[in-house]
Amino acid sequence: MKKFLNNPEDFVDEMLEGIYLAHPEVTHVGDDLRCFVRTNPVPGKVGLVTGGGSGHLPLFLGYVGENMLDGAGVGGVFQSPSSEQVLDVTRHVDQGAGVLYLYGNYSGDLMNFDMAGELADLEGIRTMTVLGRDDVASSVVGEEHKRRGVAGIFFAYKAAGAAAAAMKPLDEVARLAEKASARTRTIGVALSPCIVPEVGRPSFQIGADEMEIGMGIHGEPGITRKTLTPANEMVDEMMARILAEQSYETEKDVAVLINGLGATPLEELYVIYRRTAQVLDQAGARIRHVFIGEFATSMEMAGASISVLQLDDELQQLIAMGANTPFFKHIAQ
Amino acid sequence: MKKFLNNPEDFVDEMLEGIYLAHPEVTHVGDDLRCFVRTNPVPGKVGLVTGGGSGHLPLFLGYVGENMLDGAGVGGVFQSPSSEQVLDVTRHVDQGAGVLYLYGNYSGDLMNFDMAGELADLEGIRTMTVLGRDDVASSVVGEEHKRRGVAGIFFAYKAAGAAAAAMKPLDEVARLAEKASARTRTIGVALSPCIVPEVGRPSFQIGADEMEIGMGIHGEPGITRKTLTPANEMVDEMMARILAEQSYETEKDVAVLINGLGATPLEELYVIYRRTAQVLDQAGARIRHVFIGEFATSMEMAGASISVLQLDDELQQLIAMGANTPFFKHIAQ
Amino acid sequence: MDTLTSHDIPQLFARLSKVFADQKEALITLDGQVGDSDLGLTMAKGFAAADKAVSELGDAPIEAQLKAAGAAIARAAPSTMGTLMATGFLRGSASAKDCDDLRTEQMALFWRAFRDGVAQRGRAQVGDKTVLDVLDPIAMSVEADAKAGTGLSTAMDNAHAVAVDALERTRDLVAQHGKAAAFQEKTRGIQDAGSTVAVILIQTMADFVSHGAARPVGT
Amino acid sequence: MDTLTSHDIPQLFARLSKVFADQKEALITLDGQVGDSDLGLTMAKGFAAADKAVSELGDAPIEAQLKAAGAAIARAAPSTMGTLMATGFLRGSASAKDCDDLRTEQMALFWRAFRDGVAQRGRAQVGDKTVLDVLDPIAMSVEADAKAGTGLSTAMDNAHAVAVDALERTRDLVAQHGKAAAFQEKTRGIQDAGSTVAVILIQTMADFVSHGAARPVGT
Ligand SMILES: Nc1ncnc2c1ncn2[C@@H]1O[C@H](COP(=O)(O)OP(=O)(O)O)[C@@H](O)[C@H]1O
Ligand SMILES: Nc1ncnc2c1ncn2[C@@H]1O[C@H](COP(=O)(O)OP(=O)(O)O)[C@@H](O)[C@H]1O
Ligand SMILES: [Mg+2]
Ligand SMILES: [Mg+2]
Ligand SMILES: [Mg+2]
Ligand SMILES: [Mg+2]
């Protein structure tokens, strides 16, 4: 295992210490470094809380900031935060307008957020939940509620963040987050596994000329293993999965996210985007927003994912809004 | 070689096509995709031109944008752009106020920029040159002019970009760029080599428990090969090299850049920053600006570099200024 | 032993902590097949924390011991299985309210509460290829033995035996929950990782009841 | 042959293109030791482009042919060695102004201009462990042979021989320029990559002059 770290058990907390040292606009609740919140809350605003395992930077905590989220429960590498931590974050970010939980559809997170929400409700804090479940590889059509949340949750963050910043009420923020989430489709491909520091060895083996289509972002192996093809062919295959679920006959506007899993050079993401844009163009879509880079990683996994959000007028405006977090800066045009 | 690409020879141009498709705020001069410029030049401003090999994104072209640079000559992977390309970019960005060439100290680039500058002078375009030469591992004290330019050139870009945006004249922009460059020190470490697509195999071999201190950003092997140590020890050793050349007795303010070489997870960069901040604090420095992420990569190399710029009042103001390029967004506080 | 008292509980958790530390690598590998390889880490951490919490309690009733164990696991290992094990112990703790010791009858209540807590929290059904597929037979077996008046030691051995069978049968199921669910048909033939944890748990308890703390731990 | 005419030049560049394509992997490996592994790529690309440019010229004087070659290399391979080779051919082209053919005397002027161009553009000194350490002996050898009235074929063979020696001697030097410079003392013992290119260049030319286009290419 070749990594820059000290004791593997201290990895997450030392990372957090580094983040707090670098970015005074975020802080933690009480003594627990893993209860991650904005330093300056916005009075009266709906609180947006996410959370999940570490090892996915900038996901999850990286989206805490202006016009985005208010807090995140930070778990160990690829592990859920505890319900206690989520509850602490919830209490801290609540401004009386209620709190939206917005996180990926994973059983560990689900249970802990549910428990936190039950306890928060007892304390008079109203919570609602919207899940990221954009990974088309993880469940068939008709079973979308079972899908994993991967990089596409970024769009739900952006929509919810903008809606909350516009001081919309909790139900409305939840409605918009849910709409963004439901209209997002993601498909990923991995070329190499990743190593959880405390495990110290790769999570799966993959041949020198193989790729995994539909890998998870926790080092889970992919759904289909294939021989590595040229980038264009690979994108065509990936996009076919997305196009099978989204038609651009009436609603043409889309936002696209090309996400690197960790080790893949930015150059290659642009090669992927080039083909993605060609395919979308041919399908009749009009690309209104493009985000390319690392948005949801799996440590040092080599791989990429393509997410497409089908926009309507209200989503288009929310996605267009500027945002400013330590890890994500979007300057509105 | 596991990469997302089509024909290796098309890699750079397909990447550029992806970039132009994604970012309408940049374009190319005439038919040559590799002559990279801003779409909307600022009338009367000093032109800032950089350039160098591909494979380093966001370096070099990623810094072309608002309050940063105006153009970049884009070479093949790890290769210089041609003098003709630099000249074409120069002609295009010149607004009558002259052009500053600001690039890394490598012989291929030097010769091509020199040739372009000679030809530009013949056409009545005044050019000046400032070199990034921040890599302390590449030459001893007293021979600083021989040093390689690595990630720290980012600070010179930022200083020069801000100065030019403030409509300062060419000599003044050059003076400030030179000051930023001369006050920047960088030291890097690599854990794995990278693969140039057209070569198809790694540029060097490194053992499973080894690190290369002072590697180049073109897959050159490191100056010293050592057994991988815990992150804190490694940072201490790296910072000792920088501290040996910078003292914080009178000038305490610094800007710090923690740069990932490509495959290293952001999490690990924050573990490195944590220690860097501790070391700088102990040395009496005051960190005024922090940049953490990928600023100058070597394709998918695993590794990191630490750059420290010793600020004075005028540099501090220039570094603080906001910037907005497709690849780098800085929101001033 | 035909009963577990509050004096035994700390030793039982010490044993569990040791067993899950030993099984760490095996569980990592198991979870890696159609999951994220963390199960060994989380179980080792969770039961180590439970051990510590229980041992630090000093003299305390069983209910408090089990509650401390559950709360410690919830904090130390909030993964799917960590949270479910925590829920199980917390619910089991409530079922042991005012018990001075656990005989077969109380043990049946404990496992029923454990299973019901897991089912409720995880929203899984028997047959969904989860830990529930082993917890349910355990609960039913101990319940039957309680009705039949079987001694604790035998009841635990019986439960262990049905658990081992049930674990084997998870191979025939298709995962409906957790990270494995994405793999659908591919999970057929693979032994469920969480169910393996349940078998280790009941085996260690059965062993402990039969042989006390003296017997060396092994699998 | 004791002269090269404008009819020979396209064939010479075809040969150079082939030779550098064959040497691609070897030069990549050589440049990888204390450099960035691109030398094989750039030389193969540069000379392929030169070949193409010269062959597309049709009937043209030597000066124009060499100029086209230099310009093509500058465009196709603007690395250090690409740019230096381009500069060499462009300067050499100027030295061949109005020449109908190249005999030893004109060849001496060509190599002197080539070397001076490289020295000026690269700002290196003899002894700095660069291509100049082979180009300089080549230029001096051909110059001496021109003075002595030696025929072209022999002069080129002589130049090749001194080049091979000079390349060997680059091992004793410490790199002062290019990517290798950062390695300082570690470059001792390693043969300079750019100098190797110069040897391949003179060897191919000498071979061509001795045996014409007929002889198969090898190293
Ligand atoms: N909803 C659920 N209800 C009950 N058990 C579940 C559920 N989801 C997953 N499991 C069990 O959890 C096991 C995986 O545990 P763990 O590795 O902790 O999950 P994760 O890494 O996804 O948090 C599975 O083998 C299965 O037995
Ligand atoms: N300033 C210089 N002047 C002359 N030759 C140089 C100079 N710098 C480097 N070289 C030569 O260039 C060779 C490396 O060429 P190349 O691989 O093209 O460099 P790069 O990859 O750095 O552009 C060296 O072996 C050396 O012979
Ligand atoms: Mg997990
Ligand atoms: Mg090079
Ligand atoms: Mg798991
Ligand atoms: Mg080279």
Image (spheres, coloured by chain):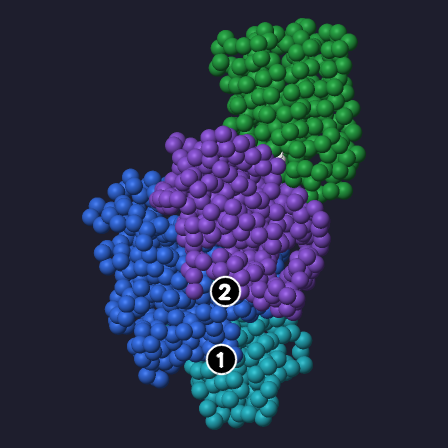
Chain colours: A blue, B purple, C cyan, D green
Question: Which residue is nearer to you in this view: A20 or D128?
Answer: D128
Chain for disc number 2: A
Which tag is nearer the camera, tag 1 or tag 2? 1
Residue found at x 31% / y 80% = A96
**Tag 2 residue:** A54
In the rendered image, is residue B290 in sight?
Answer: no
Disc 1 and disc 2 in contact, CB within 8 angstroms: no
Figure quadrant, ligand 6: top right
Q: Which numbered marker is on residue C42? A: none
Tell me: residue B268, above or below residue B175.
Answer: below
User: In the rendered structure, which disc, 1 or 2, sits on the residue that comes first in sequence?
Assistant: 1
Residue found at x 33% / y 48% = A242
Left or right, residue A44 beside residue D167: left
Percent across and percent down for residue B286 are: 58, 67
**Tag 1 residue:** A30
Residue at the farthest left position: A250
Left or right, residue B5 beside residue B226: left
Q: Please determine if labels 1 and 2 lie on a single subunit.
A: yes
Q: How many labels does the image show?
A: 2
Question: Which residue is nearer to you in this view: A228 or B40?
Answer: B40
